[in-house]
Image (cartoon, rainbow, N blue to C red):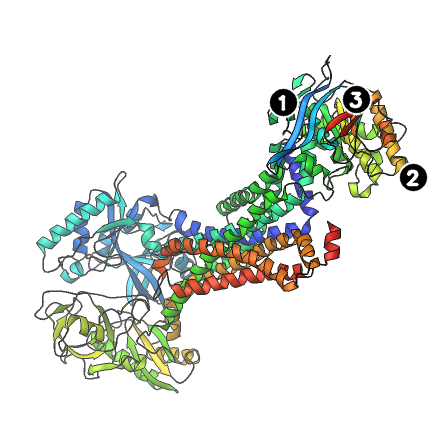
Amino acid sequence: MDALLQDLRYAARALLRSPGFAAMAILTLALGIGVNTTLFSTVDAVLLRPLPYADAGRLVSLWMNEPGASVNKETLEALRARTPSLQGLAGYSGWGFTLTGQGEPEALAGAKGTADLFRVLGARPLLGRTFLPEDGEPGRTPAVVLGHGLWRRRFGGDRGVVGRAITLDGNPAVVVGVMPAEFSFPTREAELWLPAPVDPANRGDYTTGYLTLVGRLRPGGSAEGAAAEARAVARGLRELHPDRYTDAFGREAAVVPLRDTLVGDTGAALLLLLGAVGFVLLIACLNVANLLLVRAAARGREMAVRAALGAGRGRVVRQLLTESSLLALLGGAAGLLLAYWGVQLLGGLLPAELPGADEVRIDARVLAFTAALSLGVGLLAGLAPALLASRTELGGALRERSGSGAGRGRWSWLRSALVPSQVALALVLTLGAGLMLRSFRELRAVDPGFRAGGVLTLRVLPPSAGYAEAERRVAYWDAVLSRLAALPGVESVGAIHLLPLGGSNWNPPLTIEGREDRPVVDWRVATPGYFATAGVPVLRGRGFTAADREGAPPVALVSATLARTLFPGEDPIGRRVHTGFEGKGNWVEIVGVVGDTRDQTLAGAPNPQMYRPQAQAAMNAMTVMVRSRLDPALLAPSAREAVWSVDRDVPVSDVQPLERVVAESIARPRLLVLLLGGFGALALLLGGIGIYGVVSYGADRRSREFGVRMALGARPGEVLRLVLAGAGRLAAVGLAAGVAASLALTRLLAGQLYGVRPTDPATYLAVAALLAAVVLLAAYLPARRATRVDPVVALRAD
Amino acid sequence: MPALFSSRFRPFRASGPEGPAPEFAGPLIRLRDLEKSYPAGGGRTYVLRHIELDIQPGEFVSIMGPSGAGKSTLLSILGMFDGEWTGEFHFVGQPVHRLGVKERSALSKPNIGFVFQQYHLLDHLTVQENLDIPLSYRDVPRRERQAMVADTLDRFGIVGKKDLYPNQLSGGQQQLVAVARATIANPRVILADEPTGNLHSSQGREIMELFRKLNEAGTTIIQVTHSETNAEYGNRVIQLRDGWIVDE
């Protein structure tokens, strides 16, 4: 302990005596450790910490078809009865509610769940209770469980709230419980939970798929076992009800950890970023290792003296490792400061619905990670220099006047190896960023099928109670749209029940008259003005008109992709179709074909789409689009007022330009590009500094040689070429190694790329050229200095 | 010019950190047919040839010869810095030629102290810390180290300089500290490579006087020197030329 303290004291003093070296090393490490700490704190919060449910490791999602597709209650009940691997299985559905009668009307996100939802999640209320089996029975006042945030915000944290009547969607409901602050489900935004109605008499409710399943594995039960049981259940349902279950139903049933469902593919992106910052750290390590090598070479004499005074090799190595560890710990402390800002920055950029996103912070776990990382980095960067320094040939080192240690040649191969390594690492990282950038540009260039510029959108949610009858809903929407149309500067208005790229989807199977197959289509309800306002062209037939009302022949529009894929070589106009939403046997006639829009994502081909007129399939909640000559942001207050002028109790939310909706749909790739680009730039900067250091040191060491050459008549240009050629050779080795590594590693990016292959030659060439330019620039500065060597001074200095 | 050390200098041969040095009857150093060479141009270039040498405890030996004669190489071998040689080397009866790196280090640590022409004090340590370093490498407990450093500072009359860094001292003062450092662990033998090479003549004299007193107190001194005057402080001169001992 005494020796360690002494080593530490001497290490601190040695660093204080070389402030330039120490500052450079600490800054380099701070950058590397800072970005790693930031990313780790995010990965820890989102992927590593247990979800806020009891024994969360046993919670699973059960998908009967593709992930995201919901099931009906009939399926849920069949599964409950015949999946012994599961201890419990609940259904839920994300749901929007309108709270009125408590001040300003407010649109709230929440969920409807089966009575056992909270039991399956292992969640207990802070106040009151959760659901009872009878809560969902017909005729009962719906029971409401409040989220902690809503309880504090709208009910002042009143502990007497349990039993209080509130108005949701215009209907009475009664608060039965309040959840603790840490509880959220299925997203962080959900603030209240109602029981999913149980009405055995309502066949539509029973067989309409709207539930997502969450289960708890029995202790010892496996996800594979549960999935096999679910496939057997699906087979039974297919055989029993061939009319309700397609042949594909449940064949690929899967059971996955609940976290995978909640985190989605953001998890993969986070791990990708963690890998990227790992590369940044490696480059930083190489830089510091190089600095330490130069320093160790310069301290060869000191090491020899220590050995002569009795220090064993282990003691010398320990002293040097103490110094590098101290450097790394100081770098880690500075990195923590950077991470403090980084966490705030990254936390704000994470998708709001991501579990744990608001838990991203610097806590004891992150501190422990940073400390361990710093020590690891100190050892990694310091070990090779320490081992080499401890092997200094004593006799030679002690006789040297310059004191820079014997056997300098032994260091040079290691320093030379650092340049290709840094180039290779920087290439891999920059290439990843380059591919993401190209992919993002491709994505931005995709035509969404609508014109977003100049359009303001408003989500309007008339409460279901006040607008239960279709006539009232139609009248309400007519009034809202006409008031909006009358605003100055407004060119057109329309409404659609799910905004393109808004993140929601209704996609029922479509029955086509005279055909057996039931393809899934994106199903939307729109007003006649929607298509002109959104800029979606009517390609054939006609669009919706005011005449398409209740009582008139039911009609539908289909997208070009639906027409082409489901009616190849045929004219879809006049064909009759229906979905579960029209009710069985209620055929609707296709009267027109409209342009495709990208509904879910800009990437990939557009889905087949079907539209129904709002007056025939009246929806409560719709998103209004207002196209105007004004800046959409300026129009927002008057548009909101126009909606409220019809009914002041109707909440209006998500008032935003359509362009922002489009931008948010590519927020994740943009974030990935931003972060990877930032890390790539950091890698280039650190790599450049490292290469500068190595070339600079090499050039200084050869100053006598350059002096001799110039004394013998070499021109400055020839010396310049000599230095640059040396750096160029090392860079070429690094580029080759980097390209080879990239070919293997960029495949990991494939899932994040759109419109560009992971092996895109143009990107490879551009990034390799960029790297070569950085190397040449980094080498040029010391090379130019080498040309200014005064032969007389250089030769005398030796 | 101020005196390098006070007249209070008291050499001592008390017990060292490894305990009292065991008495040994034979020669302190015995070299038999010792040779040092390295490959060059397909053959070998010899630095030392057929060295036969006995040094008794308490001797003050000066190794002399022209540049390139092999003086410093011989000193490196005696100090066990250099392990690349052939022949036999016995140190206090121990066959160094049969020892591995660790055993050589264990043998040299308690027995050998060094003084260099360049002083080789550690720049970022104070005088006091420079004296402490050899003791810490010998795992002497801190309390004991403090006492030994204080005593050495006192004996060499450099208490007032204990908190200064080497660059705050004159060359002679630095060499004085270097000699103090070489003696602090109470070695049997001090190897000195041109110890006055960088000093003015008066400073050099004082250092040589110091060596004489240490020798009189029982420490064996082996120095490499070009100076006939310095050699006169000793009782034996070994002449080297082209790697051979040519005269004694």
Look at mark 2 in the image and give the residue it sits on.
B1
Q: Categorize mark 2 by other alpha carbons within 10 Å: few (<14), some (14-19), many (20+).
A: few
Task: Pinpoint the chain carrying mark 2.
Answer: B
Whichever of labels 2 and 3 marks the residue nearer the N terminus, that label is 2
Q: Do marks 1 and 2 share a chain?
A: yes
In the rendered structure, find residue B97 and report the number of the disc placed on it.
Answer: 1
Q: Position of residue A440 (x, y in %)?
A: 39, 67
Q: Secondary structure at mark 1?
A: helix
For the residues bearing labels 1 and 3, Cβ distance under 8 angstroms:
no
Look at mark 3 in the image and give the residue it sits on.
B219
| Residue type at the position of mark 1 | His
Q: Categorize mark 3 by other alpha carbons within 10 Å: few (<14), some (14-19), many (20+).
A: many
Q: Nearer the viewer, mark 1 or mark 3?
A: 1
Q: Secondary structure at mark 3?
A: loop
For the residues bearing labels 1 and 2, Cβ distance under 8 angstroms:
no
The CA distance from mark 1 to mark 2 is 46 Å
Viewer-proximal residue among A49 and A441: A441
Whichever of labels 1 and 2 marks the residue nearer the N terminus, that label is 2
